[in-house]
Image (cartoon, grey):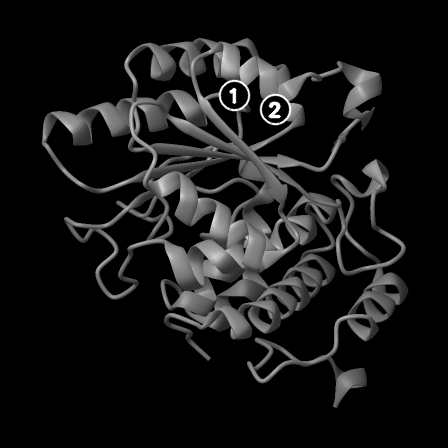
């Protein structure tokens, strides 16, 4: 089922469906990242089904907003969002990480054999914000009202290039740019505080001349309201520090960094899906034991 704009009341259900899609994709591929994509499902549901100005039937629409996924390993939740929105067939989700599939472990743009709606190949962490800054500056030169959104993981902020581009955006007052940091406090090797402490994170962005807002990234209504707030902010780029829980929605994955890059096995997948009840949206596949 392809989904267009949804009301605020409907967003939690599409978020749950996106989580179901992620679990099934990872079970089929027996490969990929679980924790981050599950934790970011509420963010992606708000973006793709309520906030972004986009057209799945015309992915290169001249008036579209730009969205860049800097943390490319989050792509399962992005692929699920694109499929539910109508950019790619829903059945294609079963091809995640398969040979010759468009849905590889990190996303590729759709200009040739990639995915419609994907503007940038990403996965080498730290690069997405630089591209987003350049895109936002270009739109400003064109006197365009379009906005640029970029999604970063908090572990990604260890990369120096992030702060170089943040300094550039702040200097040039790129106020058509909104960065979203998934602050789940986990990265591949452990808790972010243990690997390389980021705090005081908000103060760092403020020091680079950004407008900084924090919110609960797993509360869809609060996240949506926060984005609406920063959309009208002028004079500085904005960053939303969205506090989330890695693995959100699946009890045994929540807040556990060990699920950063691990897919569930069959038993774990069954348990995860049992904790994510079916929705009014059709699953892209039903396993034999679900029928």
Identify the element where label 2 is drawn: helix
Does residue 269 appear to the left or right of 154 in the view shown?
right
Look at the picture and state if 136 lies above or below 249.
Answer: above
The residue wearing badge 2 is 156
Report which quarter residue 137 is drawn in.
Answer: top left
Could you tell me which residue is drawn at 32 percent across and 48 percent down?
A: 110
Q: How many marks?
A: 2
Look at the picture and state if 279 lies above or below 49.
Answer: below
| Disc 1 + disc 2, Cβ < 8 Å | yes
Q: Earlier in the sequence, mark 1 or mark 2?
A: 1
Could you tell me which residue is drawn at 28 percent across and 14 percent down?
A: 172
Q: Is residue 56 visible?
A: yes
| Coordinates of residue 104 in the picture (x, y in percent) | 53, 46
Look at the picture and state if 207 lies above or below 261.
Answer: above
Quadrant housing the C terminus: bottom right
Task: Depth check: give the residue in front, 150 or 120.
Answer: 150
Q: Which mark is residue 126?
A: 1
Look at the picture and state if 290 lies above or below 67.
Answer: below
């Amino acid at each position: 089922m392809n989904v267009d704009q949804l009301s605020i009341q409907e967003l939690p259900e599409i978020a749950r469906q996106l989580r179901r899609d992620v679990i099934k994709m990872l079970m089929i591929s027996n490969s990929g990242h679980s924790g981050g994509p599950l934790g970011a499902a509420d963010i992606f549901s708000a973006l793709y089904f309520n906030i972004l100005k986009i057209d799945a039937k015309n992915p290169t629409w001249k008036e579209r907003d730009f969205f860049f996924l800097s943390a490319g390993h989050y792509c399962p939740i992005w692929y699920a969002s694109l499929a539910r929105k109508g950019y790619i067939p829903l059945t294609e989700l079963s091809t995640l990480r398969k040979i010759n599939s468009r849905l590889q472990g990190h996303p590729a743009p759709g200009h040739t054999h990639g995915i419609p709606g994907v503007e940038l190949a990403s996965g080498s962490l730290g690069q997405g914000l630089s591209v987003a800054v350049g895109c936002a500056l270009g739109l400003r030169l064109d006197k365009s009202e379009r906005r640029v959104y970029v999604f970063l993981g908090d572990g990604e902020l260890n990369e120096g290039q992030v702060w170089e581009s943040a300094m550039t955006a702040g200097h040039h007052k790129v106020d058509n740019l909104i960065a979203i940091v998934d602050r789940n406090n986990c990265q591949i090797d452990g808790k972010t505080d243990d690997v390389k402490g980021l705090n005081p994170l908000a103060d760092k962005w403020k020091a680079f001349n950004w407008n900084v807002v924090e919110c609960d990234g797993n509360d869809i209504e609060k996240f949506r309201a926060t984005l609406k707030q920063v959309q009208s902010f002028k004079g500085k780029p904005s960053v939303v520090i969205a506090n989330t829980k890695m693995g959100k929605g699946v009890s045994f994955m929540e807040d556990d960094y060990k699920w950063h890059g691990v897919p569930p096995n069959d038993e774990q997948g069954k348990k995860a899906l049992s904790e994510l009840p079916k929705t009014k949206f059709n699953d892209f596949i039903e396993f034999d034991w679900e029928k």
